[in-house]
Image (cartoon, rainbow, N blue to C red):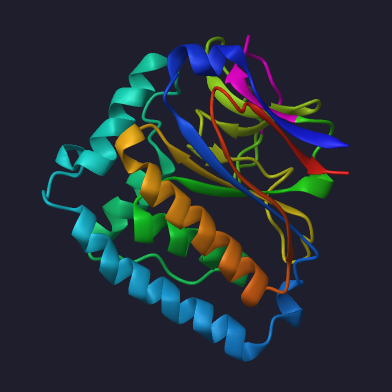
Amino acid sequence: MKRFVTEDSFWELFPEAQIGIVVAHGMKPTDQVADEDAQAIARQLKEANAAADQHLNSNTISQNEVVSVWRDAYQKFKTKKGARSSVENLLKRVLKGNPVGSITPAVDVYNTVSLTYALPVGGEDIDAMEGDIRLGITEGGDAFRALGDEEDAPTLEGELCYRDDAGAICRCWNWRDGQRTALSDDSSKVFLIIESVDPARADDLQAAVDLMADLVSERLGAQIFAKEIVTRDNPIMVIDE
């Protein structure tokens, strides 16, 4: 059995945070996704890029509320210089007229959800994890190699990250994914995460979770193993038997 465990060190920093989780099993490999489904996902991603403008009231990225709450959150733990929330990186592209393009159907799904609701979204391959996945403050030195990098970049002492028994999975909360557990074209069991630090956006988070579950089941042929909102009162969930 594998679990997602949010540690006390996380809740001490963010007592009102909510984390939406969708666990999908049996997702189709990229080469088995029907053309009509892949095209539908790509269209929805294009629409999400356009819809993201509703979240951007200022041409200065940090002055938009959906970004500023994450800038504030990142002041509460140790980060690598320049680290920013994943949603800021996506919205910055929209602001600059450089929309997020299609990558693979699975990645397109979570980028669609992130842009639609202006919330950070990530995805990991459950079969590539070793033991439970945990979110909390680390003592540092967790093994990590970011997607696209050729050198290791271990975590810092006091950094907030997702990690398992083999090292870090995503650094600086939702800043950079690692190569080891990243979704691949053949990922079948997937752990999808949507994060919110603004309790006023609870309805948006629930809607984002529902959209994610609908897309991976309807377009990618997955069975939804679990769908939950993780909170301080509900800090642990099972993600694989």
In-image side of 121 versus 91 (left or right): right
- Residue ranking furthest to the left: 58
On whether residue 132 falls in the magenta region, the answer is no
Q: Nearer the viewer, residue 205 or 114?
A: 205
Q: Residue at x 68, y 45 (%)?
A: 179
In-image side of 11 versus 59 (left or right): right
Q: Residue at x 78, y 30 (%)?
A: 132
Residue 67 seen from this side: yes
On whether residue 141 falls in the magenta region, the answer is yes
Q: Quadrant of residue 35?
A: bottom right
| Quarter of the rendering occupied by the C terminus | top right
In-image side of 25 versus 99 (left or right): right
| Quarter of the rendering occupied by the N terminus | top right
In-image side of 81 versus 110 (left or right): left
Q: Residue at x 40, y 38 (%)?
A: 85
Q: Position of residue 17 (x, y in %)?
A: 44, 29
Tell me where the magenta segment starts and ends, as one range.
133-144
Q: How many numbered dots are placed on residues in this image?
A: 0
Q: Quadrant of residue 71?
A: top left
Q: Nearer the viewer, residue 209 or 80?
A: 209
Q: Nearer the viewer, residue 60 or 147?
A: 60
